[in-house]
Amino acid sequence: MTEGHLGSPNSAVLVWLPVGAGGHVVRHTSTWWEQGCAVLERRRPATLFHAALELRVEDVPYVIEMAPAWAAPSVERGVVATGPVGTRWLGRYRWFRYEVRCWANGVILDREFARSTPVVLTVDKTAVTQVLRAVSQVAPLTWGRRAPGTSEMWNSNSLISWVLAQSGLSTNLLPPQGGRAPGWMAGMEIAEQDRRRAS
């Protein structure tokens, strides 16, 4: 892996964004949550990060991320899946749903707040195409709940690590500045479960 963008017509790039960047409510609630976790785990609080992917396929840009449906811009966003937040029955209401986006010519709304140089994962066309194909196959699990057999809750980081694992790309990635990416391990664990079921 190398850091930075390359002038390639095909690429997969990982972007780390501070959780709640550009907002107030999510930033404060996630900070309080992390402070509580740090007390229970007897460690110092860390900055929480949210992962997203930027792809180029034959020079067409795509954005892959999971985000709340209520925070969505009123344009076509390449939504390939939706799921509930908190509990499955709450997912009937827009305020408790998330979207998985594979958005051609899309934007990451908080992209300007990225804390480090984006990491180029691959410039191989086949690998990038596999990422694009995998994202549409994600299961609509409940955001904020642990899926069976996983050690962390399912969230936006889980989506990205699951997509990378399904595509054969490295998931051995860490957020910048000693930060944490809750949910990252859950995506890897679910991908491993999928592989075992398919074998």
Image (tube, rainbow, N blue to C red):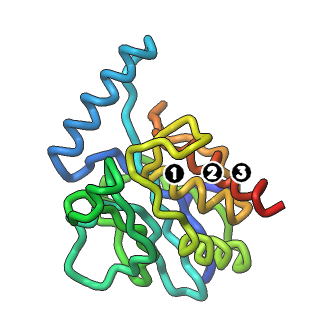
The image shows residue 74 at horizontal and vertical percentages of 20, 80
Of 47 and 195, the residue lying toward us: 195
Q: Alpha-carbon neighbours of circle 1 within 10 Å: few (<14), some, or many (≥20)? A: many
The image shows residue 159 at horizontal and vertical percentages of 51, 57
Quadrant where the C terminus sits is bottom right
Q: Secondary structure at mark 2?
A: helix
Q: Alpha-carbon neighbours of circle 2 within 10 Å: few (<14), some, or many (≥20)? A: many
Residue located at (32% from left, 47% from top): 86
Residue located at (38% from left, 68% from top): 82
Specify the amino acid type for callout 2. Answer: Ile
The picture quadrant where one finds residue 101 is bottom left
| Residue 158 numbered mark, or none | 1
> In the image as oriented, which residue stretches furthest toward the top?
42
Q: CA distance from mark 1 to mark 3?
A: 13 Å
Q: CA distance from mark 1 to mark 2?
A: 9 Å
Mark 1 and mark 2 lie on one chain; the one further toward the N terminus is 1
Q: Secondary structure at mark 1?
A: helix
Specify the amino acid type for callout 1. Answer: Ser
Q: CA distance from mark 3 to mark 2?
A: 5 Å
The picture quadrant where one finds residue 136 is bottom right
Going by the image, does 151 lie left or right of 189? left
Residue located beneath label 3 in the image: 192
Of 32 and 82, the residue lying toward us: 82
* Labels 1 & 2 near each other (Cβ < 8 A): yes
> In the image as oriented, which residue stretches furthest toward the left?
24
Q: Secondary structure at mark 3?
A: helix
Does residue 118 lie above or below 182 as drawn? below
The image shows residue 162 at horizontal and vertical percentages of 60, 56
Residue located beneath label 2 in the image: 190
Residue located at (40% from left, 62% from top): 66
Of 172 and 155, the residue lying toward us: 155
